[in-house]
Amino acid sequence: MSKGESPLVDSPQDGRHGDPPAAKERITVNLTARGASALADLVKRTGDSKTDVINRALALYGFFESVMDEGGAVFVRRAESDEPERVHFL
């Protein structure tokens, strides 16, 4: 791990979004350039740690998958539009 990078465990922010502190699992992830850029952007925009951003992304992905597994669909409405758009996951 290079200087300035934070580990993917033991974030001081754990539990901040309503999740109880729990057992930690250390993993190594190889991000594409696009993924690394998205992670850096979200860390900067939210002020959350890399760990928190990844945990929240996984929780949302899990929620979306469960909705779609049950026959539902996920929609978003952009600020400049009144029409909802269906989200498709590849």
Image (tube, grey):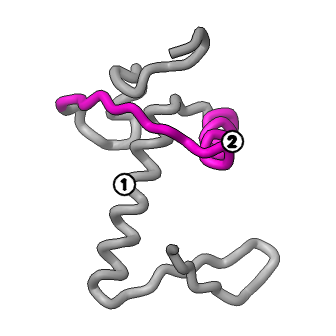
Mark 1, residue position: 59
Q: Residues within 10 Å of mark 1 (few under 14, many from 20)?
A: few
Q: Please, what is the three-letter code of the amino acid marked with disc 1?
A: Ala
Q: Is residue 18 above or below residue 62?
A: above
Q: Is residue 10 above or below residue 40?
A: above
| Residue 68 drawn at (x, y percent) | 36, 81
Q: Position of residue 18 (x, y in %)?
A: 33, 43
Task: Tell me what residue is drawn at x 35 percent, y 29 percent.
Answer: 14
Q: Secondary structure at mark 1?
A: helix
At 23% from the left and 37% from the top, the residue drawn is 20
Precedes in sequence: disc 1 or disc 2: 2
Is 69 within the magenta? no
| Secondary structure of the residue carrying numbered label 2 | helix
Looking at the picture, which amino acid does disc 2 mark?
Answer: Ser
Q: Position of residue 4 (x, y in %)?
A: 60, 13
Answer above or below: position of 63 versus 83. Answer: above
